[in-house]
Amino acid sequence: MPETSSVITTIDSILYKDIVKLVLLCTINEE
């Protein structure tokens, strides 16, 4: 089912972006 795979990929990419944002914020706050 391509649709399901696409949705999972989209969710994964959104979560990944959120995690990257959090890490960047933490890094900036550390300095």
Image (spheres, grey):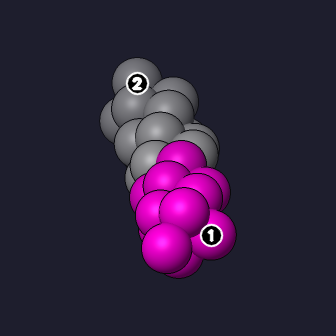
Amino acid type, label 1: Asn
Q: Residues within 10 Å of mark 1 (few under 14, many from 20)?
A: few
Q: Is residue 5 above or below residue 9?
A: above
Q: Is residue 11 left or right of residue 27?
A: right
- The structure residue drawn at horizontal position 49% and vertical position 73%, both measured from the top left corner, is 31
Of mark 1 and mark 2, the one earlier in the sequence is 2
Q: Secondary structure at mark 1?
A: helix
Q: Where are the magenta residues, as a range?
A: 17-31
The answer, for residue 4, to whether it is visible in the render is yes
Nearer to us in this view, 28 or 10: 28
Q: Is residue 5 left or right of residue 4?
A: left
- The structure residue drawn at horizontal position 40% and vertical position 32%, both measured from the top left corner, is 5
x, y percentage for residue 25?
60, 68
- Number of numbered discs present? 2
x, y percentage for residue 23?
50, 55
Instruction: Residue 6: name its quadrant.
Output: top left
Q: Which residue is mark 1?
A: 29
Q: Which residue is mark 2?
A: 1
Discs 1, 2 touching: Cβ within 8 Å: no
Amino acid type, label 2: Met
